[in-house]
Structures are given as structure tokens and as C-alpha cells.
Image (spheres, rainbow, N blue to C red):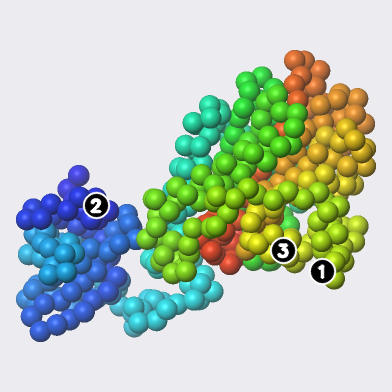
Amino acid sequence: KKYSVVASLLTNPNIGNVAEVKGWVKSLRVQKDLVFADVSDGSTANKLQVLIPKNLKTNDLTYGSAVHITGKLEKSPRGQLELRADYVKVYGTCVVLDGYPFNPRTAHPPEYIRNYLHLRCRTNYISAMLRIRHSVTKHIHDFFASRNYLNVNTPILTSNDCEGAGETFKVLPDSEETIKAMLQEGKTNDDVYFGRKSFLTVSAQLHLEAICRGMGNVYTLGPTFRAENSRSRLHLSEFYMLEAELAFCDDIEQLQSILEHLLKHIFSEIRNTNEADLYLIDKNNVAPTWLKDRFITLTYDEARNILNKKGLSTNEDGINKEQELALVEHCGGVPVFVVQWPKKLKSFYMKESDFDNSKVDALDLLGPITGEIAGGSLREVNYEKLQSKLPSEALNWYLELRKFGNIPTGGFGLGLERLLQVVCGIPNIKDTLPFPRWPHNCSM
Ligand code: 4AD
Ligand code: MG
């Protein structure tokens, strides 16, 4: 390696040593004999202050330019690490007047930054978010590794619509029309690419269940696609979902417990690893009070009663976003599990409650800012009951999992982007990943 990473320089400062850095100028203050530049290389929220003698300053050394600097590490009168430059090279110039959309004097709002998806990782807001996203992913993997869960990859191309909501992106060579036309032309199924309709996955759950029924606890963190026609601040067409499936699980409280521990692990670890990044996004971001409290559990009926008393009357369609947020507020901002859902509101694979066959053993986890952050359930374990609810023969393989060495399982899916909204305090989900896709927006 020919140069130092700013994060390492700042955590292990070797005063008096020579250092070489490569990065981007985040601010520039010109004084009588010296130019002060703050340089970032993406590795940390903190910038390295560089002192550049005026004779080394070129016209190209501007805000936003890419630089290569060598010099000696010193301690400023305030005890801060500084690099006193003896060599400055500008790799790439950056002229605001040429159309660079950011300048150091303006606090650009996220909506403005979002107009420049290709450049926006140069802002504090998005670069801090991306470092937090990286760390949250690591904390998730550490959490499951310490509990001996197997991390697996499940297919993106599938032939099932797990949630049955008809929100799949179709993969075109296999569209029904194409297949029909080809068959009419005298071709056989073997000539069609997959021989059946195929989609981009809406959930890894069914595949996870297959592995769980042979190997025990599993999880995956992967891309998920939903052609929802929703342009809200909470929906994306492409997002990442963490999905876990618990073997020998016959009590929904086991799912609640792991979700609660997982969230507390992530929220406390992120304060150790990314405090400065959290501050860059929201100066008022403090550790949530609920890290020490138990999450709250309400049955669906209890939740409806609370909402009705608040004048937010519910109908047969379930609980809407405004009502989800009202429930969390009612519980003092502590995450809320809503359990025991009416069967007709939930998917086919969910286990019928032993006590009330109009209900299923399902949960939604609601958090502040986003409302629903995770959804899960015990899975129907009984072959005949599952058979009677199976939406399509194409899922016979899923039914057959109940035939050989069957076990009770339960699992959940947690949206990584919604989680990041709550961790960082980001109102709009489009600012939780570098290149968001939502209806009519897939231009790069
Ligand atoms: O509640 P959902 O649809 O649950 C499932 O897909 C189950 N099969 C998961 C399982 O049990 N393995 O989705 C789970 C979570 C939601 O709670 C939400 O956080 C996120 O995925 N999510 C979305 N995030 C962003 N944009 C969208 N369009 C989302 N749809 C769901
Ligand atoms: Mg859901």
C-alpha cells in the first residue's frame, strides 16, 4: 500500500512520522501563509486537517478536488492531528462553476442531494449513511454467527410469489404470452427458457424453509424486489431483506426474542462503531431509551382497541401506516410487536392459531419513523392444512417439505433500509442505499 488510510491515521496518530494520503478536499480556508484543507478518503466521518504552505497551493486545489498529499504528522495547539504538507498533487479538479452541485457553504437538504445520485456519496449525509450501512451489515452477521446460524444465499430468479400479493417483477423471456406463442409455434416446453413463468424474488422465505428443514437455523441478507405501486417515503422497488428461519420453533415468543435481541445488538454496537457518522446525519441522534426496556407486545385486537379509543378507527384491511406510528407513539416510542393477526389479512403459509382458527401466529414489529420494520410468523406445519391453502401447484415442492422429516419452524423478514431509517433517523428510505429504485425511477 502506497498511502495511509485516514481512519487509521486518526486512531493511531504517530506524531513526527511522514504520511501520505489520497482523498477529496471537503473544505478549504486560505490564510496569510497557509491553506487549511480538510481531507476525507471515505474511511471515516472525521476529516484529516492538512496545512499547506501557500507556495504549494495551485489554482486546481479547490473544494471537491481529488488530491495526493505527503507531509509530516503534527499535533495542533489544540491537540488535534494535522498533516503539514510538503507535496501536493491534484488528481482531479473540481469546479463548482462547471456544474458541481455541492458547495461548502450550503447545507444541502436530502431532496436536493437526491437529484445527483451519481455524485451524492461525496456529501456528509450519504457517505455517513453508507458507512453505517456497512457496519449494520457486519453487526447482523456477527449476531447470527455468534448464535451458530448458517448464512445462505437464496435465488433472485424464482418461480414463486411467496407473499401472494402479485407484486412480482416478471422476468420477460418466460412471460405467459411468450410461452403460449412458442408452444403454438410447435415448440415444446424445453425450448422456453425456464419452461415456466419466472420472477425476481419477493422473499427468500420458502427457500430458507427448505434449508432450515434439513440443516437447522438459517438466515440470508439479500436483494428483494417488489413492483408495488407505492411512492411513499417507506417503499422501494428493490431493497435488502434480512430473513431468518428458526428450526424447531413452535412459539412466536422465540421469534420476538431474537428480533428484540438483534435490534438491541445493532443499536448499541453502532454507537461504538459509528458515533461520528450518526452525528453527521442527525446531531440530535441519541441512544434510544428502549435499549434497556422490553419491547411491547399487543394482540391485533388490543391494538385495534387502542386505535379506536384514539379516534383512529380501523376497518377490515388491517392497520395502516398512520395507525402503526400512532401505536408506537402510544407506547412511548418503544418498538411494538403486534401478534395474533386475522387469517384473512396474512399469507397462506402462516400457522393457524391453536386457540382461534380465524387467527394466525404472525407478528409485525413496529418502530418509530417507519412503522412496520419486520414481519414474521410460525409456519403451517400440518401437511393437510397447508395443502388446502396452497395457492398453486407450482408450490408442491414447498408442501413436500412437510412430508419428510418435518419440523415446526418460524421466521421473519426485516427490511434493511427501514432498519437504517430508524438507526440513523432518516425520514426517506431513498436515502438509505446508494442507488434507490422506485416507480418511474430507474434511470442509472
Ligand atoms: O412483511 P413482509 O412482506 O414479509 C415477508 O416477505 C416474509 N416472507 C418474511 C419472512 O417471514 N421471511 O416484508 C418484510 C419486511 C417488511 O417488514 C419491511 O421492513 C420490508 O420487508 N419491506 C420493504 N422495504 C422497503 N420497500 C418495500 N417495498 C418493502 N416491502 C417490505
Ligand atoms: Mg409485512
Of pointers 2 and 1, the one earlier in the residue sequence: 2
Quick one: label 1, few (<14), some, or many (20+) residues within 10 Å? few
In 3D space, how far apart are the residues under numbered discs 2 and 1 (Cα atoms)?
51 Å
Residue at the spot of label 2: 11
Of pointers 2 and 3, the one earlier in the residue sequence: 2
Give the structural element (helix, strand or loop) at label 2: helix
Q: Residue at x 53, y 30 (%)?
A: 147
Q: Are marks 2 and 1 in contact (CB under 8 Å)?
A: no
Q: Quadrant of residue 382?
A: top right
Q: Are marks 3 and 1 in contact (CB under 8 Å)?
A: yes
Quick one: label 2, few (<14), some, or many (20+) residues within 10 Å? few
Which of the two discs, 2 and 3, sits closer to the camera? Answer: 3
Q: Residue at x 90, y 35 (%)?
A: 355
Residue 130 location (% of width, % of height): 44, 56
Residue 88 location (% of width, % of height): 13, 66
Give the residue type that dot 3 points to.
His
Give the structural element (helix, strand or loop) at label 3: helix
Q: Seen in the image, is 381 located left or right of residue 149?
A: right
Residue at the spot of label 3: 330
In 3D space, how far apart are the residues under numbered discs 2 and 3 (Cα atoms)?
42 Å
Q: Nearer the viewer, residue 181 or 93?
A: 93
Residue 395 location (% of width, % of height): 81, 31
Q: Is mark 1 within 8 Å of ligand 2?
A: no
Give the residue type that dot 2 points to.
Thr
Give the residue type that dot 1 points to.
Lys
Residue at the spot of label 1: 310
